[in-house]
């Protein structure tokens, strides 16, 4: 009974995920196709500057990318190619998009991973402390700073950090150096400012979520029971209250990844010149390189989908209450 | 048409207010179609957005506020007790005044003047080395800020104060208009989805899921990349992509209202679906809508600023993001150009967050503020 329930739930979720993935592909396709210019037009502008015959070039490009075929055929080949792992050709860097992504994803990944871990650790600890000592001076200070952290535009924070620590004090380089090996202290050092830039807003958010989730649970009856039993406060807070507060917290952290963090990482990469997926998409935008922009948008959407799917399933597995919904 | 006929018609759509709304909306659409197909440019694209939102605002915000003054006074008493919310509100009002009347007193924010470039704010002075072509040497020149440019100028000699005031206008326009679109769309989709349920609900919610799967900012970049930057279009896109969260919240609120007695009573009296949605469901989620609207303005303002910051904003208008971009490119000389727009953005976002939090507490009967 228990097992089949979980299996059914996972199958249902997977089915939904497939529908959403299809929807994401279709929305992207429609947006590209209803756009005022064809990818060929933009490429043409590039070539015309080199003095080639426009009409021939357009025809050649349209034939190469199947833009001359009927729309449903284009759609079918677009979906088919993506599923087969053919993500197109990057015109500005002259390499397959998939190769471009393979070499650059790690830079985004390290930034997001470090920021998330740091923000979650510090944010949750401050949140717990503020909830336990509600209305204390520390609580007010933490609340005040979390308001600031949420409201500060992260790209501006990045510029200010560069101004203060790199330009004025000369402690860091103003630009991310790709020559540094990934797993080295020098790389960690040059990630300090980007991680603060991306992590501050996240940390402020997590502090607030944790505080309110802890406060909700602190008022519950089982806490009074635990205290009446004479359990030490450390156990009451650590086991009874925190464990109940942590599940919704994980959902929020996961949800934030997609809605806020990816956008924040995009901007952080641009500010610091980190060659991650955001930066290559940004370069592609200004080089009119359709395939790369489409690919990065799709990949980020698929990642969000995957993260949500895993969170939902893990949640159902860990929290028996939602099974009766 | 007779008085009785109007009353009957109004009853079918949920009151005289909705009848006026529908008539004005039809008129608006007619003008728009005329504009597109027959004559050229009756209003600018932004003008149409203002008109549409102005109509909704008058009928659904100003009118209810006017007819229930006692309730407004009660809520204002509650909001007033939250000091931060009052400060936030004061800042927002200040910003509106600045955006409306500021341009009358300042220079053209786009006018470059290389004679007066790199001027620091009043009270500061910087040293700049200038190449002298005659002697072939660098000479050091001290530039001191003057009252002519209280906040200094950038590396093209544009007045920073004028640029900030222009940016305030852009940010407020984008914040209010795009939020208005997103809220209207989200409310409609949320209420309809919850009220009709079944297949409609399923389809609308799956569509919401699909839109929510795209990271918001990346979707914006993608769309602006394809269609090109233009302020009216950016407002429209932020509005058309930002409704998903609103729709979810309104839907869950409506779901809990749907089975309440007053809805059942309205149904039993033979009210149509349109009347129930417009006259009973939406008025009951209005306070939630106001709170969500206030709290989503900061995100919208930041999204536009970020777009301009990376160079995807409307090149024809001076926005805070664009000023910050200019400042970032010359951080080692004119650092004040990078500092100032961020401070404005920061305080604006903070102010709207304070007001939103204050309103939420005031509307929540459980809170004892």
Image (cartoon, coloured by chain):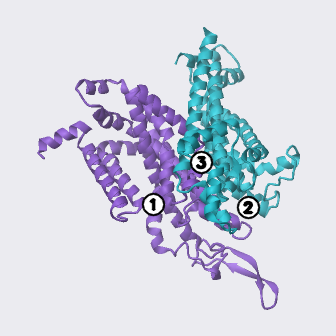
Location of residue B75 in the rendering, given as x and y in whole percent from the top left corner: 38, 42
Residue displayed at 31% across by 50% down: B25
**Gap between marks 1 and 3 measured at Cα:** 26 Å
Q: Chain of mark 3?
A: B
Q: Residues within 10 Å of mark 1 (few under 14, many from 20)?
A: some
Q: Position of residue A270 (x, y in %)?
A: 70, 54
Residue B355 got which mark? none
Tell me the residue at 53%/47% (across/down).
B353
Residue lying at the far top in this picture: please name it: A1
Residue A163: mark in rendering: 2
Q: Is residue B340 visible?
A: no
Chain letter, colour purple: B
Viewer-proximal residue among B42 and B12: B42
Graded by Cα atoms within 10 Å as few (under 14), some (14 to 19) or many (20 or more), the crowding at tag 2 reads many
Could you tell me how far apart the alpha carbons at marks 2 and 1 are, in whole angstroms? Answer: 30 Å
Examine the image and state in which quarter residue B28 appears: bottom left
Front position in the image: A56 or B89: A56
Helix, strand or loop under label 1: helix
> Looking at the picture, do discs 2 and 1 lie on one chain?
no
Subunit bearing disc 1: B
Q: Nearer the viewer, residue A50 or B20?
A: A50
Mark 1 = which residue?
A: B96
Q: What color does chain A have in the rendering? A: cyan
The quadrant of the image that shows the N terminus of chain A is top right
Q: Which residue sits at x=74%, y=68%?
A: B332
Q: Earlier in the sequence, mark 1 or mark 3?
A: 1
Pointer 2 chain: A
| Residue B277 falls left or right of residue B111 | left
Determine which residue is flagged by label 3: B217
């Amino acid at each position: 009974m228990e097992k089949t329930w979980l299996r059914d739930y996972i199958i249902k979720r997977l089915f939904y995920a497939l529908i959403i993935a299809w929807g994401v592909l279709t929305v992207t396709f429609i947006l590209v196709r209803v756009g005022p210019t064809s990818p060929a037009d933009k490429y043409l502008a590039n070539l015309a500057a080199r003095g080639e015959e426009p009409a021939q070039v357009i025809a050649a490009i349209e034939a190469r990318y199947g833009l001359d075929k009927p729309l449903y055929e284009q759609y079918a080949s677009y979906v088919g190619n993506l599923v087969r792992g053919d993500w197109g050709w990057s015109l500005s860097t002259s390499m397959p998009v998939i190769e471009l992504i393979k070499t650059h994803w790690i830079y985004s990944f390290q930034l997001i991973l470090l920021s998330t871990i740091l923000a979650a650790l510090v944010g949750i600890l401050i949140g717990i402390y503020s909830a336990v000592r509600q209305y204390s001076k520390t609580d007010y200070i933490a609340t005040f700073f979390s308001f600031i952290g949420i409201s500060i535009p992260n790209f501006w924070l990045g510029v200010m950090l560069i101004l203060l620590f790199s330009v004025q004090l000369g402690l860091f380089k103003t630009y991310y150096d790709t020559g540094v090996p990934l797993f080295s202290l020098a790389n960690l050092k040059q990630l300090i400012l980007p991680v603060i830039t991306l992590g501050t807003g996240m940390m402020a958010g997590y502090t607030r979520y944790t505080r309110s989730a802890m406060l909700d649970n602190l008022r519950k009856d089982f806490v009074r029971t635990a205290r009446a039993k004479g359990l030490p406060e450390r156990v009451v807070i650590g086991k009874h209250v925190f464990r109940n507060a942590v599940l919704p917290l994980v959902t929020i952290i996961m949800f934030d990844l997609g809605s806020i963090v990816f956008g924040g990482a995009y901007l952080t990469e641009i500010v610091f010149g980190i060659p991650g997926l955001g930066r290559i998409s940004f370069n592609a935008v200004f080089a009119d390189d359709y395939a790369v922009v489409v690919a990065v948008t799709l990949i980020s959407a698929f990642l969000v989908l995957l993260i949500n799917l895993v969170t939902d399933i893990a949640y159902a597995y860990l929290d028996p209450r939602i099974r009766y919904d | 048409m007779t008085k009785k006929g109007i009353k009957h018609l109004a009853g079918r759509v949920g009151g005289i207010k909705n009848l006026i709304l529908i008539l004005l909306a039809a008129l608006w659409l007619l003008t728009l179609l005329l504009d597109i197909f027959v004559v050229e440019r009756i209003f600018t694209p932004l003008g149409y957005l203002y008109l549409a939102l102005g109509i909704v605002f008058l009928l659904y915000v100003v009118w209810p506020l006017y007819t229930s003054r006692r309730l407004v006074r009660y809520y204002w008493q509650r909001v007033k007790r939250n000091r931060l919310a009052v400060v936030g509100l004061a800042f927002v009002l200040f910003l509106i005044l600045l955006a409306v009347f500021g341009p009358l007193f300042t220079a053209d924010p786009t006018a470059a003047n290389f004679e007066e470039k790199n001027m620091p704010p009043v009270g500061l002075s910087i040293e700049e080395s200038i190449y002298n072509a005659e002697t072939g040497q660098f000479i050091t020149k001290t530039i001191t800020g003057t009252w002519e440019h209280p906040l200094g100028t950038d590396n093209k000699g544009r007045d920073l104060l004028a640029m900030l005031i222009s940016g305030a206008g852009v940010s407020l326009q984008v914040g209010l208009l795009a939020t208005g679109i997103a809220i209207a769309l989200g409310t409609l989709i949320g209420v309809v989805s919850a009220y009709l349920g079944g297949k409609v609900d399923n389809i609308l919610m799956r569509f919401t899921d699909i839109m929510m799967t795209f990271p918001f900012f990346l979707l914006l970049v993608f769309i602006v990349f394809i269609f090109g930057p233009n302020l009216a279009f950016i407002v429209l896109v932020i509005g058309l992509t930002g409704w998903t969260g609103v729709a979810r919240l309104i839907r869950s609120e409506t779901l809990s209202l749907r089975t309440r007695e007053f809805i059942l009573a309205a149904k039993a009296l033979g009210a149509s679906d349109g009347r129930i949605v417009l006259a009973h469901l939406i008025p009951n989620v209005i306070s939630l809508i106001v709170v969500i609207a206030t709290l989503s303005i900061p995100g919208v303002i930041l999204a536009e600023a970020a777009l301009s910051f990376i160079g995807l904003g409307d090149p024809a208008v001076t926005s805070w993001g664009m000023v910050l971009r200019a400042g970032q490119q010359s951080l080692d000389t004119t650092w004040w150009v990078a500092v100032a727009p961020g401070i404005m953005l920061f305080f604006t976002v903070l102010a709207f967050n304070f007001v939103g939090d204050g309103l939420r507490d005031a509307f929540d009967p459980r809170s004892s503020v």
